Image (cartoon, rainbow, N blue to C red):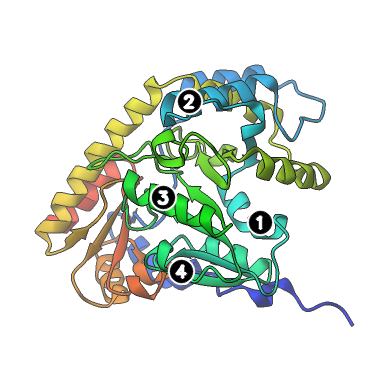
Amino acid sequence: MPPSPVSGLLPAFPWDRLEPYKAAAAAHADGIVDLSVGTPVDPVPEVILRALTDAGNSPGYPTVWGTAELRDALTGWCERRLGATGMAHGNVLPVIGSKEFVAWLPTQLGLGPGDRVAYPRLAYPTYEVGARLARAEPVVYDSPTELDPDGLRLLWLNSPSNPTGRVLDADELTRTVAWAREHGVLLVSDECYLELGWEAEPVSVLHPDVCGGTYEGIVAVHSLSKRSNLAGYRAAFVAGDAAVLGELLQIRKHGGMMVPAPVQAATVAALGDDAHVTRQRERYAARRGALRTALEARGFRIEHSEASLYLWATRDEPCWDTVGELSKLGVLVAPGDFYGVAGEQFVRVAFTATDERVSEAVRRLTA
């Protein structure tokens, strides 16, 4: 008898439910303004394109652990941008996009039935997916330090949060790191929006004030998709406990999980140039301000949203009612219950559309 399909372990793909509202928004006379998905729309910076092109003649297999230049760039960026200290090549590992890492980490760690994976009550759905793929038990939390540690093998943090934009301060992170170490739980912090703080300055778990200068039991996940418009490149990396990353490296070598050589070169260029990040932040800040003003004028309340690429908005009504009303204006947003039942009266509004489309959304919202 063939094994039962893995797809039976997974929840329904939530974005399929949004298709009728997308069709309604697309029928608007002036076209759709899609604010539902946080995908970059601005051009890839020229310095990165040049690096990718220059490395295009790469006929040989790349290494799973990356070139020495890439590992230098990763450790150097962690030290410069995150305040991490004493980073060595063994403390970093390139991955093929952060979503791939999130989804397959529990499996690669050898988790299975009887093991528990914890993540925030409002969260990126792939944390749950990863637990289910490994046949581990997914567990949601409001406060990680109040979790029952029995059987808990993996604890996800997400700061800045997707979808809420909430930022955990250094004290919260420090307490959680100490708790995880006390109970022997691997702590993995998804920090993909760390460079997009607006009303708060996000802190990494790799900062010495948080981790005490040692990376034992902690891993941070970073992506170039948002800060450098590289979602199409699948450029990401993880940093932290060398023992954990060493085990993952062996598994990923067997699985052929190699970041393409031109993307490795592009990553080196992206992490070595801060100017394009500053320009992109300015674009996002302007779009965020315009959309926030328009939403508040239409009666929405914005909660958290102090960082990331989203506004977490509510009018204290069912989220699908909000999605339906906005779709009639040709504006598509994500329903909050995609991220957990606690979001059922919220919508997530991305500000990753072009300046022209954001201006059009503002016009419709304030008409």
Q: Which residue is mark 2?
A: 79
Q: Alpha-carbon distance for marks 3 and 1?
A: 22 Å
SS of the residue under disc 4: loop
Residue 312, position in %: x, y? 28, 59
Q: Quadrant of the C terminus?
A: bottom left
- 3 vs 1, front mark: 1
Q: Are marks 2 and 3 in contact (CB under 8 Å)?
A: no
Q: Alpha-carbon distance for marks 2 and 4?
A: 31 Å
**Which one is earlier in the sequence, the residue at label 2 or at label 3?**
3
**Which one is earlier in the sequence, the residue at label 1 or at label 2?**
2
Tell me the kind of residue under disc 3: Gly
- 2 vs 4, front mark: 4
Q: Which residue is mark 1?
A: 104
- 4 vs 1, front mark: 4
Q: Alpha-carbon distance for marks 4 and 1?
A: 23 Å
- Give me the residue at 78% from left, 79% from top: 4
Q: Alpha-carbon distance for marks 4 and 3?
A: 30 Å
Tell me the kind of residue under disc 1: Trp
- Give me the residue at 43% from left, 54% from top: 176
Residue in front for this viewpoint, 13 or 264: 264
